[in-house]
Image (tube, rainbow, N blue to C red):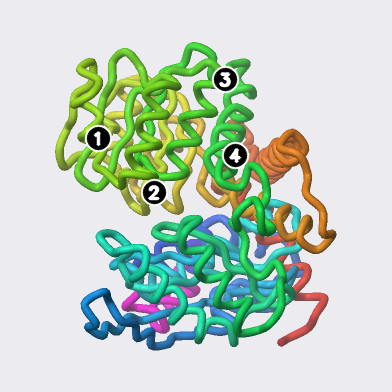
Amino acid sequence: MEDKIKLFMDEVKTRNGHEPEFIQAVQEVAETVIPYIAKHKIYNGKNILLRMVEPERLISFRVAWVDDKGDIHVNRGYRIQMNSAIGPYKGGLRFHPSVNASILKFLAFEQVFKNSLTTLPMGGGKGGSDFDPKGKSDDEVMRFCHAFMLELNRHIGPNTDVPAGDIGVGAREIGFLFGMYKKIRNEFTGVLTGKGRSWGGSLIRPEATGYGTVYFANSMLQTQGKDFKGKTVTISGSGNVAQFAAEKVLHLGGKVLTLSDSQGYIYDKEGIDEEKLAFVMDLKNNKRGRISEYTEVYTSATFHKGVNPWEVKCDVALPCATQNELDGEDAKTLIKNGCICVAEGANMPSTPEAIHEFHQAKILFAPGKASNAGGVATSGLEMSQNSLRISWSREEVDSRLKDIMSDIHDSCIAYGKEDDGYCNYVKGANIAGFVKVADAMLAQGVI
């Protein structure tokens, strides 16, 4: 079996040798899915995983825009349409200097499995640009978004490809993007999700990824007769996902100790309560400040520059910042300090070495394709509401989100339970996501 996996990965590396993030994502899936394929004749000899690894379409385009001084800038835009076997492409747009084809391909590949796990009819895609919204005026961001959509509009549509937000693409950016799409196409459709509440958006959408991560972690804890009540929790990040993960932890009775940004993390030994979290939300969402400013207001907290919060003792860790932020040494530290559960709120925030350590220690570990699927699940619910021209209540959307996260957890258990009773959620998520997409691809033939 190791030889089969190696042969497969050798072919992937030959084609994508300059894309380390993508190779890392494929390796994780291959190690669990290829043994499953070998045991099931329906998939054998069909090269189904190799077909999943290759994007159906990779679009790259120039984005020229003018800043407030009248200077012209050029950025690169992308849309990776990975797999449409079970529905239109669905996945976020990321505006960040680190954006390149490798990162977007890994995100799109993960999205295929994540969307499959939600049980909603959505294929996988991802896109974005190396444009950095930080430090830009609203007018500059508007001009960039309009220029970006001038090209992107050719490749998307409510039944073709439905982008959403991601890092660097929030409500402001979605508004500008949607406005230009509507003007160009002369139609008001649900072509983007994460829209404003008054123009087609869904309640709970901003909260969904963070809430969903905590719902999933709570389901994991319940398999051991535990929950969040009284648990200490470390969270990385201070953006949308981290903020609402912290909010839901507080709702469930947990104590949040940390938040972070690219400069470092804050540790509040008294806990980040609802009042303190409201300060963080205002700081990051409205004032666009740095997390270190928290310590200027709350003297119970300390700021730790240039490091991640995984050295802090906790019961539950929720990495909600970015890919590969939690490495093997961090994992060893968490385990040594008594951490019993790790659930990924970001996409692939744990390195392969970290995941190995978690599995060796037999602690609860959820990969992002399962635990952070709440965001795209609620995007799918937004698409449904747009199609039906209705708006569900906050309670109804939240209830549907909880049910979806519970169903994803059950699917992971079904495919990931090992002989000793331990659940390998990585294996469970990969196989459960693979089966639905693979079956659809087989039914549709070699296309």
Front residue of 400 and 389: 389
**Element assignment for label 4:** helix
Please, what is the three-letter code of the amino acid marked with disc 4? Gly
**Element assignment for label 1:** strand
**Residue wearing tag 3:** 252
Residue 281's place in the image compared with 100, above or below, is above
Let me know if residue 10 is in the magenta part: yes
Quadrant hosting residue 271: top left
Per the rendered image, the range of residues in magenta is: 5-19
Q: CA distance from mark 1 to mark 2?
A: 16 Å
**Residue wearing tag 2:** 349
Residue at point 38% right, 66% down? 95
The mark that comes first in sequence, 1 or 4, is 4
Q: CA distance from mark 1 to mark 3?
A: 23 Å
Q: Can you give x and y, in whole percent of width and height, for residue 142 in the image?
A: 42, 70
Cβ atoms under marks 1 and 4 closer than 8 Å: no
Q: CA distance from mark 3 to mark 2?
A: 24 Å
Residue 314 visible within the image: yes
Please, what is the three-letter code of the amino acid marked with disc 3? Leu
Cβ atoms under marks 2 and 4 closer than 8 Å: no
**Residue wearing tag 4:** 212
Residue 415's place in the image compared with 26, above or below, is above
Q: CA distance from mark 2 to mark 4?
A: 16 Å
Crowding at mark 2 (Cα within 10 Å: few <14, some 14-19, many 20+): many
Let me know if residue 232 is in the magenta part: no
Mark seen at residue 209: none
